Image (cartoon, grey):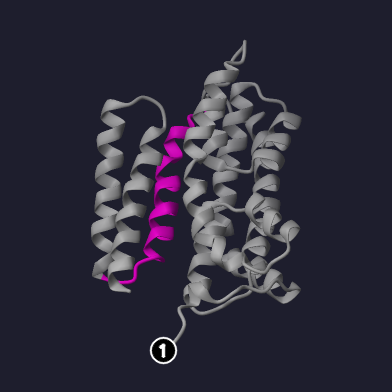
Amino acid sequence: MMEHSEDVPGVFTAAGFRRGAVGVLAIVPAAAAFGLVYGVAAAEKGMSLLEVALSCMVIFAGASQLVAMELWREPLPILAMVLSVLVINLRHLLMGATAAPWFRGVPGLPAFASLYFMTDESWGLAVAERRRGQVDAAYMLGAGVSLWVFWLAASMSGHALGDLVRGFDPSLFGWLITGFFVVLLAGFWRGAGDLLPWLVAAGVALATRQVLPGTWFVLTGALAGSLLGAWSHVRRR
C-alpha cells in the first residue's frame, strides 16, 4: 500500500527554501498591493513609519494588523486590540496542526522559524506542495520570508504614499482582500468532496457574525469546516 504523503517525514534544505521563495512570487503583487493599502491607511490613522515597520516585522499578519489599526486611537485600547488579534489568529492553531507532519524530524529552530513566518498564503502554497508529494519543509519558510520582505517594503512605501494622499478610505480596497483569498481557496479544490466543508465553514462564519461581535466568526467558521473536513478524510481512509 502506498504511504500517504502526510505520513512521510519532512526534510529541510536550502534548495527547498529557494523553491518556496520563488514559488510565492506569483502572489506577491496581490500581497504587495495589500501592504500598500495597509501603509496608506496606517498613515491616515497617525501611525509613524517606525510603528508601521515594527508591526510588519514583528506581527506579520495582514488581517490582524488591519484589525489593530482600526482600533488605533489615543489612549490605545490595549486589551481590545490584544483580544481581537488573538481571536483572529487562533486559526493558526489549525494551520499549524495541518503543517505539523511535514516537520517531523526537522530541528526545532527551523521548524519554529517556519511557523513564525507562516501566513495564510505561505501555508496554502506549502499544503499544495505537500499534496504533490514534496517533503522539503523549507519550502514554507522560503515562501514566508519572501512574503515578509515584500510585505514590509510595500507597507513602508504605502505609509510614504499616505503622506501625499488625504481622505483615503481603505474599505474601497475590500474587493482586493476578498479576491485574494478566493483565488487562494480555489487552489485547494480537490473535487466535490470539498464542497460541503467549505459551505459549512461559510455558513457558520456568517451565522456567528450575526450574533457575536468582533472576529469570532473567523475562528468558528474555520473550526467547523476543519472538523467536518477531518471527519470526511478519516472516513475515506
The reply to whether residue 156 is in sight is no
Report crowding for label 1: few under 14, some 14 to 19, many 20 or more residues within 10 A (C-alpha). few
Q: What amino acid is labelled 1 in the image?
A: Met
| Residue 180 shown in magenta | yes
Q: Which residues are magenta?
A: 168-191
Identify which residue is drawn at 57% across, 56% down.
29
Q: As displayed, is residue 117 above or below residue 14? A: above
The reply to whether residue 232 is in sight is yes
Question: Residue 49: x and y, percent?
Answer: 73, 31
Identify which residue is drawn at 56% across, 61% down.
100
Question: Residue 61: x and y, percent?
Answer: 58, 42
Callout 1: SS:
loop
| Occupied quadrant, residue 173 | top left
Report whether 172 appears left or right of 52.
left
Identify which residue is drawn at 29% across, 72% down.
236
In the image shown, does 157 or 88 lie closer to the viewer? 88
Report whether 97 appears left or right of 59.
left
| Occupied quadrant, residue 2 | bottom left
Q: As displayed, is residue 80 above or below residue 22? A: above
The dominant secondary structure in magenta is helix
Residue lying at the far top of the rendered structure: 75
In the image shown, does 35 or 234 lie closer to the viewer? 234
The residue singled out by tag 1 in the image is 1
Q: Quadrant of the N terminus?
A: bottom left
| Residue 175 shown in magenta | yes
Identify which residue is drawn at 62% across, 63% down.
140
Report whether 212 appears left or right of 152.
left
Q: As displayed, is residue 236 above or below residue 85? A: below
Question: Residue 146: x and y, percent?
Answer: 68, 59
Question: Residue 217: x and y, percent?
Answer: 36, 36
